[in-house]
Image (tube, rainbow, N blue to C red):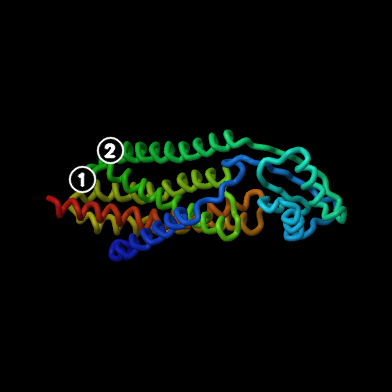
Amino acid sequence: MFVIKYKKIFIGISVLFVTLSIAAVIVFGLKLGIDFKGGSSLELSYNTTRPEITEIKDSLINSGFGDASIQPAGEKGIVIKSRDLTEAERATIVSLSSLDGKYQVEQKSFTTIGPSVGSELKKKAIASIILVLLAIILFVAYVFRKVSYPVSSWKYGFVVIIALIHDIIIPTGVFAVLGHFLGVEVDTLFIVALLTTLGLSVMDTIVVFDRIRENITANRNANFSDLVGQSLSQTFGRSINTSLVVLLMVLSLVFFGPESTRLFSIVLAIGMFFGTYSSIFLASPLLVVIESLQKKNK
């Protein structure tokens, strides 16, 4: 199987993307939404047509609300997110959004999240990702507990975690770049998308590993590298086809879905792509590398 033959190249590609993603997060940081840092969210709806977002943005900037971000909501609505707003500031923003009365606008909702609540949500988001990763490694170690030759069961779990960390670091790095250059904010939907990515990615990896386990049981004296390559050949088409179907559906949400779920869809699309890559081109080659290192150390 070409994946095993050129394993160093495929592993190197993953290392490159992960390194670039980590660098992006360190250099640019993540632009946190009000879910995590606190602030106000104001949803407005226009009675007829909605003005250009740039016009609304310019109106807010000229009046001292330059930190506000504006997102379209449906055909006639917008969502304005900013720092904590007083009642007077909220009324001012509503007025400014009408562009001096040129457009009729009405408020649909107004929500304020305090800094302490945002900080608590951030801690829970990080904790949820860590707990999911721990649960997955325990599950994999248990499922592969009877596979101890030539690679022990806990190492399967270790490889899965490396693949999953790969799958969440790369989308995070992409959003660090998007946040720096386009002002894209990270909110709770981003975390939900990452957790969904973890679930979809681990299923693909488990399918390949399960086939490796079956082939090891049937051919215990065969070369491990050949068995992994054989297992990949047997599952390659299934993994690619399944992931492509899901990816096409997610991309349709990115381009044709509502604005409110676009962030979620973009994260999921990136995660699905690199999750499929890690299941095929990273996880299994890493098993072969680990087995080779074990041989050398004996």
Residue in view at x 67 percent, y 46 percent: 82
Q: Is residue 74 left or right of residue 162?
A: right
Expressed as whole percent of the image width and height from the top left, the position of residue 276 reads 43, 55
Expressed as whole percent of the image width and height from the top left, the position of residue 61 reads 72, 55
What label does residue 119 carry, if any?
none
Q: Quadrant of residue 226?
A: bottom left
Q: Is residue 223 left or right of residue 237?
A: left
Regarding mark 1 in the picture, which secondary structure is present there? loop
What residue is disc 1 on? Answer: 149
Residue nearest the viewer, comparing 150 with 138: 138
Residue in view at x 33 percent, y 39 percent: 143
Q: Is residue 185 left or right of residue 196?
A: right
Expressed as whole percent of the image width and height from the top left, the position of residue 208 reads 36, 51
The quarter of the rendered structure image containing the N terminus is: bottom left
Q: Quadrant of residue 253?
A: bottom right
What residue is disc 2 on? Answer: 145
Image position of 138 with respect to 202: above or below:
above
Residue nearest the viewer, comparing 233 with 43: 43
Q: Amino acid at mark 1?
A: Tyr
Around disc 2, counting alpha carbons within 10 Å, would you say few (fewer than 14), some (14 to 19), or many (20 or more)? few
Residue in view at x 77 percent, y 47 percent: 93
Image position of 275 with respect to 153: above or below:
below
Q: Is residue 259 visible?
A: no
Image position of 3 with respect to 40: above or below:
below
Residue in view at x 43 percent, y 39 percent: 132
Question: How far apart, in angstroms, are the residues tagged by discs 1 and 2?
Answer: 11 Å
Regarding mark 2 in the picture, which secondary structure is present there? loop
